[in-house]
Image: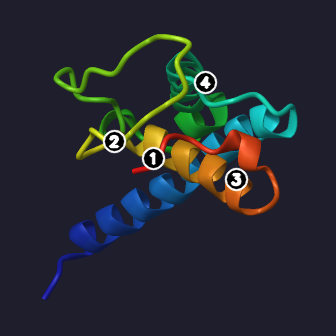
Amino acid sequence: MESNGENLSRKQFSRAVRDLERITRQVAGRYIEQGVPLTWRLLHAIEAEAVADLGFAGRHEPALRELFARPDNFHFPETDDVVDVACSDALPAVFAFAVDAYERAARHGRPQLAIAAH
């Protein structure tokens, strides 16, 4: 049987995931609405803005927020090339949320926003 602490931690983690996803999709949505393609440089900017969101910081403990930090060994280009995740086996959470937002936009009438196929 789970302890209350484990259950609470799972709930807190799930809540933080949903919160970070919502924030990331809002940030990415601004660029999607403007028709801005998802470049590596923009993806890094979206990540920086999402994880620095003051509301996110206020709603979640530092130790929980650190779980969403990109690991030091995850290196991605910082160029103006359109994002291509075909060669990546894993993406940090914010990257995955932003890529998904762009993929959805491409499938729903914004094909110019498609990222490289994977």
Choose mark 2 or mark 4, whichever is in front.
2
SS type, badge 1:
helix
**x%, y% of residue 38?**
62, 30
Q: Could you tell me if the residues under marks 2 and 3 are in contact, i.e. CB atoms within 8 Å?
A: no
Frontmost residue, 36 versus 52: 36
Q: Which residue is mark 3?
A: 106
Q: Could you tell me if the residues under marks 1 and 2 are in contact, i.e. CB atoms within 8 Å?
A: yes
Residue 31 in the image: above or below residue 86: above
What whole-number distance in Å separates the C-alpha atoms at marks 4 and 1?
15 Å
Q: Is residue 14 visible?
A: yes
Colour scheme of the picture: rainbow
The residue carrying pointer 1 sits among few (fewer than 14), some (14 to 19) or many (20 or more) residues within 10 Å by Cα, namely some
SS type, badge 2:
loop
The residue carrying pointer 2 sits among few (fewer than 14), some (14 to 19) or many (20 or more) residues within 10 Å by Cα, namely some
Residue 5 in the image: above or below residue 91: below
Q: Earlier in the sequence, mark 1 or mark 3?
A: 1
**x%, y% of residue 41?**
54, 15
Q: Which residue is mark 2?
A: 91
Residue type (three-letter) at the residue carrying disc 3: Ala
Q: Quadrant of residue 46?
A: top right
Residue type (three-letter) at the residue carrying disc 2: Leu
**x%, y% of residue 53?**
62, 29
The residue carrying pointer 3 sits among few (fewer than 14), some (14 to 19) or many (20 or more) residues within 10 Å by Cα, namely some
Of the 4 image quadrants, the one containing the N terminus is bottom left
Is residue 5 left or right of 101 when viewed as pictured? left
Q: Which residue is mark 4?
A: 49
Residue type (three-letter) at the residue carrying disc 1: Ala
Q: Earlier in the sequence, mark 4 or mark 1?
A: 4
What whole-number distance in Å separates the C-alpha atoms at marks 4 and 3?
23 Å
Residue type (three-letter) at the residue carrying disc 4: Glu
Choose mark 4 or mark 1, whichever is in front.
1
